[in-house]
Image (tube, grey):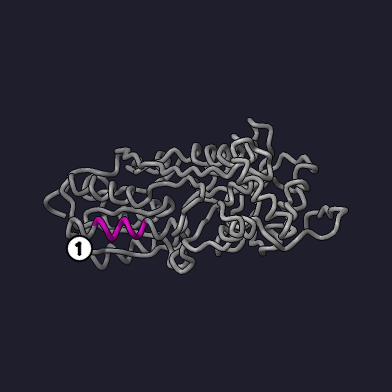
Amino acid sequence: MMPVFEPESDEPSEISIADVARVAGVSISTVSRVLNNKPDVAKKTRTRVQRVINELGYTPYVQTVQQSKTNTISLHYPLLSQTRLEVTDIELDFILGASGAAGEAGFALNLLTRDLSAPEMLDLYRTGQLRGLILMETTLEDWRVQLLRNSDCPFVMIGRCADNQDLSYIDLDLEGAVIQAFEHLITLGHRQIGFLGFPTSTHERKLSSAQRVQAGYERVVWQHRLPTHFRHVDFGVQYAYQAACEMLDEAPGLTAVVMAYSATAVGLIRALQERNRSAPEDFSIVGIAPGKIANLVHPALSSVDFPLYQVGYQAAQMLMRQIEEGTSGVQQILIPPQLVVRETSGPLQKEV
């Protein structure tokens, strides 16, 4: 367990910055600017906020953080709460990008890879062990977001929630990526297109990335009146292989597949080879954000790509800007997908 710095003063008030904002009739960011003595607050508003702070007995934790002079930000990615322990190429690039941006700015990046309770998460900030948080694995109704929303702790998300008002995030347009992948195959003449999606567990957890991928699939199938050939695939090559075998055996007329994550590629290619089929000769494959694996498999994987390293890099920059400027000014960035045609997608062959 991390060492905990206990302030010499009495225990801080349970009143939160959100309480101050609500009573004063202003936004949380306005209260934050008052606490940080920013000049862009009207005198009347500043006086009202300060009066409410005094009346409620609100004790901000920002002084503790400043006194500690820590230059550490944390990325919360609860790997150990999942049934898998490996990091995908997408996630690794996010982490490396955030670490790169932090290092350039003189910050250290701490990777938190376990579930935290609400008190544990807040104490990391209140005791000066970190100056802000980047949240990964965001869910549609993420308890971490609601917790941090009502605190002084700066934070940004890689991903989105259902309600993103006043929240800073950077996210991949995964819904658009799935649509782009399918429409690429449709232009090549394919209509019998399978989809290997995220595990059922990701939907049960309401993981935002899984929900948006699923939304993209349902939308493109409806728009183009396509038959549905869908499988949830657990993380891991063996699970991908099993799901691909089941799909190909149940729908032998399939001529193409779109994959939601990269590990599926190896399993799918093996399943095709066992059935004397190959891409792109009589089958087409498109992956969503496969990362490095796109050029490691043979044939090279056609895919819809994103600048993954830059996503992590920009997330860290957004967070450090909040910290240095003492403001929670909202930034929301949605990264568009880019189709990269390699070797696994080709025109529909008339006979399969």
| Residue 233: percent from left, percent from top | 40, 63
Q: How many marks?
A: 1
Inspect this view and state whether residue 82 appears: yes
Relative to 257, does residue 281 appear above or below in the rendering? above
Question: Which amino acid is tagged 1?
Answer: Pro
Inspect this view and state whether residue 111 appears: no
Secondary element type, mark 1: loop
Q: Residue at x 34, y 43 (%)?
A: 303
Q: Which residues are magenta?
A: 213-220
* Left or right of 78 in this view: 53: right
Along the line of sight, which residue is nearer the eye, 190 or 204?
Answer: 204
Along the line of sight, which residue is nearer the eye, 106 or 162?
Answer: 162
Along the line of sight, which residue is nearer the eye, 261 or 120?
Answer: 120
- Tell me the quarter of the picture where residue 296 sits: top left
| Residue 65: percent from left, percent from top | 75, 46
Image quadrant holding the C terminus, namely: bottom left
Relative to 256, does residue 83 appear above or below in the rendering? below
**Can residue 218 be found in the magenta stretch?**
yes
Residue at the spot of label 1: 227
